[in-house]
Amino acid sequence: MLALIRREIALGLRQKGEVLTPLVFFMVIASLFPLGVGAESSLLLRMAPGVLWVSALLAAMLSLQRMFATDYADGSLEQMVLSPTPLGGGGGGGGGGCWVCNLDSTAGPWVF
């Protein structure tokens, strides 16, 4: 499982543009929301936690598409399914590596 996490981190660091996209998306949502609602500070203060959660979760969804896309394209996803190791270990290793590589967006809910 640690080998899968290291592999996912190496793959994620090769594609720096895809790692930064969720972070930029999060920042855009969080900064444009007050412009749409208005500048009333009491309203913004009550809505801020929900807005941050929703924008972090939407940003995390951007990175979910590529989590297993490269594994499916090169055939290693089929090898994980056919291997004698439990499927949860392979999926957990891939998901954990993707999560570590995308700490900017997918770890957002854990930070808040």
Image: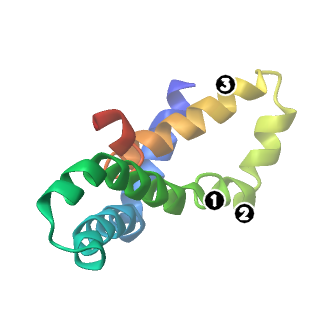
The chosen color scheme is rainbow
Name which residue lies at 58% across and 60% down.
Answer: 66
Circle 2 crowding by C-alpha within 10 Å: few under 14, some 14–19, many from 20 = few
Of the 4 image quadrants, the one containing the C terminus is top left
SS under mark 1: helix
- Which residue type does callout 1 highlight? Thr
- Which residue type does callout 2 highlight? Ala
Q: Which residue is mark 3?
A: 89
- Residue positioned most to the top: 85
The correct choice, above or below, for 83 with respect to 58 in the image is: above
Q: Which mark is residue 54?
A: none
Circle 1 crowding by C-alpha within 10 Å: few under 14, some 14–19, many from 20 = few
- Which residue type does callout 3 highlight? Gly
Q: Which residue is mark 1?
A: 70
Q: Which residue is mark 2?
A: 73
Q: Quarter-wise, where is residue 9 in the image?
A: top left
Q: CA distance from mark 1 to mark 3?
A: 18 Å
Q: Are marks 2 and 1 in contact (CB under 8 Å)?
A: yes
Circle 3 crowding by C-alpha within 10 Å: few under 14, some 14–19, many from 20 = some
The correct choice, above or below, for 51 with respect to 3 in the image is: below
Name which residue lies at 38% across and 61% down.
Answer: 19
Name which residue lies at 36% across and 69% down.
Answer: 25
**Viewer-proximal residue, 101 or 63?**
63
SS under mark 3: helix
